Amino acid sequence: MTPRTADKTVSVPGLTLRVPHDQARPRLLRSSVITLACMLVAMTASALPLAPSEAGAAPPLKVIATVPTYGELAREIGGDLVDVVVLCRPGQDVHSVSATPSMMARCRGADLLLHTGLDAELWLPNMLRGSSNNALLPGNPASIDLSSKVTLKQVPRKLSRAQGDVHAFGNTHVWTDPLAVRAMAATVRDALIAALPDHAAEITERHGAFHLRLTKALVGWLTEAKALRGRPIVVYHPSWVYLLDRLGLKQIGTIEPKPRVAPTAHHLDELLATMQHERVAVVIREPYQFPDAADFLAERSEAQVLVLSTHPGYPEGVDGIVEHFAYNIGALIAAYAPRAQSAGEPAANGQANDQANGQANNGRSDEHDSGNDNG
């Protein structure tokens, strides 16, 4: 009679399995028991907590920005701590964004929403409802209204559809003023610290560096732009009032007779006469606006057309906020420089430093109201 071989044991944490080594038992049974033991080992190991070195860094905060300026603010201040998705493309009309299923999906897992508030992004409520992300709804801590620290311009005294597409709370294009953007940066800083308190020092440091860089640039821009003060300018749509007021330019007309109303031949003829009388040097249109009307006015006057975007990312390569403002303000200064020289006027100089520093240290937009129409 063949002697019985000693049984083998297989141990896993907290469990010992006894595997009979019996020549008479089917080989299949022994194999199944060993397989079960291996599965238990794997399950036990996967349930154990990872060491800090194995766990890796926390995933970045998912931030949704309605427009490119807000996206760049989040990247400047959040750095690698944030993953930013921008809903409106550079050079796109913010009022015409569509609430598509893909955008709703992007909002679904977001932690933070940066938006203008007011009635700038009328497509946003439908997008948020479609995303089922109630945390991003207005009034919640994750919904950050970036117009809250800006004094609004062109607030209508009365509302009527006869005035065109007028915004009820005032002109919503607050991101065109570098001082307003500087105030927004502080709001973004506070929101990121609230969401990522363990990284408060890093966020504060990044915000401080951006604040200093923008302020230094602003002092230079306002000094150089002294020669622009009082100069007449025409725009396609009233998107630029905050920047024009900051630089001292005088908007004497818009290609649209009323906000978002197409120009008529009669309106263009009247505007052309005004431009010729005022010797307008510049007409601004945005990339998404049809060029025909602006070109018509420029060809029949002394003006040139500047195609400028109110947000970073257009033209290609002008991505940062400081770079964006430098491009737009530089284009305006360059366009008016030949006119100033032909009139024998001095170029901007250091005498404007006091005024520039005064404006650069003001955290809010001016109270000045440039009219009733707004875009």
Image: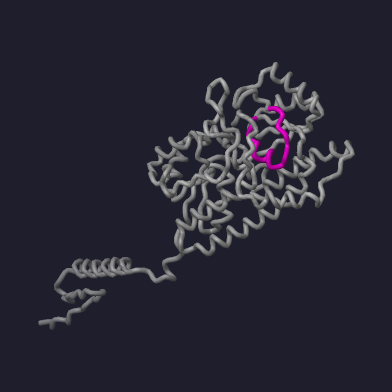
| For residue 227, side relative to residue 105 (left or right) | right
Q: Nearer the viewer, residue 301 or 2?
A: 301
Q: How many marks?
A: 0
Q: Which residues are magenta?
A: 237-253
Q: Residue at x 48, y 57 (%)?
A: 60
Q: Residue at x 67, y 46 (%)?
A: 324
Q: Is residue 287 above or below residue 65?
A: above
Is residue 341 in view?
A: yes
Q: Which residue extends farthest left?
A: 1
Q: Nearer the viewer, residue 155 or 195?
A: 155
Q: Residue at x 13, y 83 (%)?
A: 3
For the N terminus, the quadrant is bottom left
Q: Quadrant of residue 208?
A: bottom right
Any magenta on residue 244? Answer: yes
| For residue 122, side relative to residue 264 (left or right) | left
Q: Nearer the viewer, residue 300 or 241?
A: 241
Residue 227, image x, y percentages:
80, 42
For the C terminus, the quadrant is top right
Any magenta on residue 240? Answer: yes
Residue 305, image x, y percentages:
75, 32
Q: Nearer the viewer, residue 1 or 282?
A: 282
Q: Which residue extends farthest top?
A: 266
Residue 230, image x, y percentages:
76, 36
Q: Quadrant of residue 155?
A: top right
Residue 146, image x, y percentages:
53, 45
Colour mapping used in the image: one colour
Is residue 320 in view?
A: no
| For residue 53, side relative to residue 308 (left or right) | left
